[in-house]
Amino acid sequence: MFYGWWIVVAAFLNLFFAVGIIFYGFPVFYPAFVESLGFTRAQVTQGFLLGFLVAGLPFGFLAGAMIDRIGARLVILSGAGWSESPCC
């Protein structure tokens, strides 16, 4: 099998587990969250939004500043290493 297809499979699986489950899996579990936790629909959605704001804004600005200073390659490699580390 051509080596490039293994790269495609690895990239697909990485994006599927890192992004796909979070963004596209949330609507699947949304009714279960509302029913089992006893929250309103607005509270469940606000929690999802606050999670993105707390994680996305600071790290987005930090990544942008680091890309300006040291370049995109090292920032992307460090982010990939951090997200794939077994400790967290």
Image (tube, helix red, strand yellow):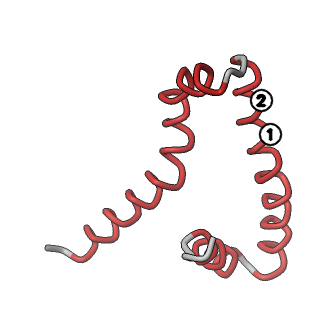
Front residue of this view, candidates 14 and 36: 36
Q: How many marks?
A: 2
Front residue of this view, candidates 81 and 3: 81
Q: Which mark is residue 14?
A: none
Name above or below for residue 43 compared with residue 18. above
Name above or below for residue 2 compared with residue 8. below
* Residue designated by label 2: 46
**Image location of residue 43, percent across then percent down:** 76, 24
Q: On the picture, is 57 further left or further right than 39? A: right
Corner quadrant of residue 10:
bottom left
Corner quadrant of residue 84:
bottom right
For the residue carrying disc 2, how many other residues have a C-alpha within 10 Å: few (<14), some (14-19), or many (20+)? few
Secondary structure of the residue carrying tag 2 is helix
Residue type beneath disc 1: Leu
> CA–CA distance between discs 2 and 1?
6 Å
Circles 2 and 1: CB distance less than 8 Å? yes
Furthest toward the left, the residue is 1
**Rendered-image quadrant of the N terminus:** bottom left
Name above or below for residue 48 compared with residue 86. above
Front residue of this view, candidates 27 and 44: 44
Residue type beneath disc 2: Gln
**Image location of residue 86, percent across then percent down:** 55, 76
**Image location of residue 22, percent across then percent down:** 56, 44
Corner quadrant of residue 85:
bottom right
**Image location of residue 68, percent across then percent down:** 82, 73
Secondary structure of the residue carrying tag 1 is helix
**Rendered-image quadrant of the C terminus:** bottom right
Residue drawn at point x = 73 percent, y = 78 percent: 71
For the residue carrying disc 1, how many other residues have a C-alpha within 10 Å: few (<14), some (14-19), or many (20+)? few
Residue drawn at point x = 71 percent, y = 22 percent: 39
Residue drawn at point x = 38 percent, y = 58 percent: 13
* Residue designated by label 1: 50
